[in-house]
Amino acid sequence: MISVNSVTVSFGGYDLFDNVSFLVNPKDRIGLAGKNGAGKSTMLKLLAGQQNPTKGEISKPNDYKIGYLPQDMIHQHGRTVYEETATAYEEIQRLEDRLKSINHDLETRTDYESDAYMNLIHDLTDIHTRLDYIGAGNREEEIEKILKGLGFERADFNRQTSEFSGGWRMRIELGKILLQKPDILLLDEPTNHLDIESIQWLEETIDQYAGSVMLISHDKQFLDTVTSRTIEISNQKIFDYKTNYSRYLVLRQERKEQQESVAKNQQKVIDQTEALINKYRAKASKAAFAQSLIKKLDRMEIVEVEDSDTSTMNFRFPPPALCGKIVLTVEHAGKVYGTKRIFKDANFILTKGEKIALVGRNGEGKSTIMKMIAKQTDFEGVIQIGHNVRMGYFAQDQAEKLDQNKTVFETIDELAVGEVRKNVRSLLGSFLFGGEDIDKKVRVLSGGERGRLALCKLLLEPYNLLILDEPTNHLDIRSKEVLKRALLAYEGTAIIVSHDRDFLTDLTEKMYEFRNGQVKEHLGGITEFMQKLKMQRLNEMNTKSPFVKAKEEAKVVKPKVLPVNDEHEKELKQIKNLVSKTETEIARLEAEIKIIDEQLSDSAQYQTIINDKETFAKYEQMKKQLDIEMTAWENLQEKLEAFKV
């Protein structure tokens, strides 16, 4: 459990948070919401201990383990993918070394009744519990499962991490955190570099995760799937909703409407009171009454209506130019880079008005075929553009390709022609570039601003074929929804690559999956496609991989060694004594914990207990100790059973 108590964070005289408090409970699934700059990433850094609050405190148990994945981080090189991922088990190595030391002590000591001996037993039990939890016994299988879930092939395991892009190295870091199984996962935009399959796998992993999770994401469906609590950061305060993102939006709107209603009624009272004050202030006989009204106004707590960031893009694609019925024909198309084949024998025909999605894991060729269609790379086979087709191409790195030294206005103005050129300022305004923003250099824009500017360029001509490769990158949830509505209303033809399932839902009628060098057609939408993938993955999980099989076959099972007869009675007596002591300790701990549980369930006493650091720390320690004693008791019972064999 993490307790955020009256925390304030200030930067240069400005309060990012002002006296905020909340609890992160065991197994919580929390999504952080709020506009850009509200402080979501800062909150994760505070909880991770990478930043200190200006005032207040963040408390957690001493042995509480935190796994934090920031948006940007420094990656280590010099290891293979497998070796780097295996560094997640450094804790296991430390615990195993400690285990050897304890076992040696237990073998050589004879003070079985002493407190020191009992402490060694407790330490032994604690270490075994932790090793079981973090999967010490099946490291190779766990590493492979995590890496494959994140999209790595077995052939990648022995490749150097330096051979991979920043996005793939970020997956390795995420894999290491998941293998460490901390008490809480703090994830800042974890889906940014994941494909659809890996996002679905991460959802299932989080669902089964034993600890707590707090995350930031612009993927609406991901938030709805994995979170059951939403903490909104707004106007330096937090608002806690016990629900997922979509339901939070509804409740947030209801709260704002209630605030506006209360504020409106309060303003009526204020206006009436001020009118009475003005009426009686000048009359000597009513001066005291007027003063009492003034004091009443001074004491009144003004209801504040939250400032909502309602700014959002507002645009429609221009009507497409007339073209033939067949917009695009692809026959036996393929691509080879050097000695590596990406895919082969792709075949499909795209007719006027169709909207299709290209899906599959990263690196399978989706962006490559987009470049092939746009004539930006050579290829095998035939790709034929239809009669009078005018193509608009949005590359995955389109935002990064913008001229850094030009202003926002210059970027659009130099490409605009005819009537469009007369309305450049209005066009930029619809993409949230107003006032002085249009004179900003591209190099100072945020990722989201560059993404909007790159999209704006697609409105400069009446294209009848749009090729959009990850157009939602860097866009917030509202901007994605605006882009989706514009595409739904677009009368032309579109090919879309996206890993955002909410964006693709109801947008495309057909999918083409790129997998293992092949291109396969799927009729239906993204929901049906994801269901097929899930069933396929479940079938694969039932078959053990050759990698894990080889490891298992290499293991030699050691025969169980029973106690020597001469020592049998002595050891049996020692174990029975330990069982008795453990049962007594369990009974004591359960009784004391029950008392505090009853106090916590009483709303009148809850806050007092939470604020009493000493009592609350003792409560947490007793719960941990109870777990240790229970595990010790179970292990001792197993030993007793062994004596009966």
Image (tube, rainbow, N blue to C red):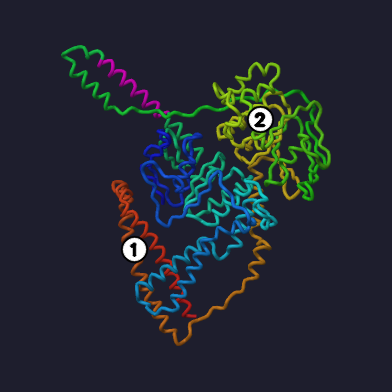
Q: Is residue 102 left or right of residue 595?
A: right
Residue corresponding to mark 1: 589
Q: Nearer the viewer, residue 170 or 333?
A: 170
The secondary structure type at the circle numbered 2 is loop
Q: Is residue 378 left or right of residue 118?
A: right
Q: Position of residue 314 (x, y in %)?
A: 58, 25
- Identify which residue is drawn at 35% across, 72% down: 115
The secondary structure type at the circle numbered 1 is helix
Quadrant of residue 335 within the rendered picture: top right
Residue corresponding to mark 2: 403
Q: Position of residue 248 (x, y in %)?
A: 47, 37
Mark 2: which amino acid? Answer: Asp
The stretch in magenta equals 257-277
10 Å crowding of disc 1: few (<14), some (14-19), many (20+): some
Mark seen at residue 241: none
Q: Position of residue 40 (x, y in %)?
A: 48, 40
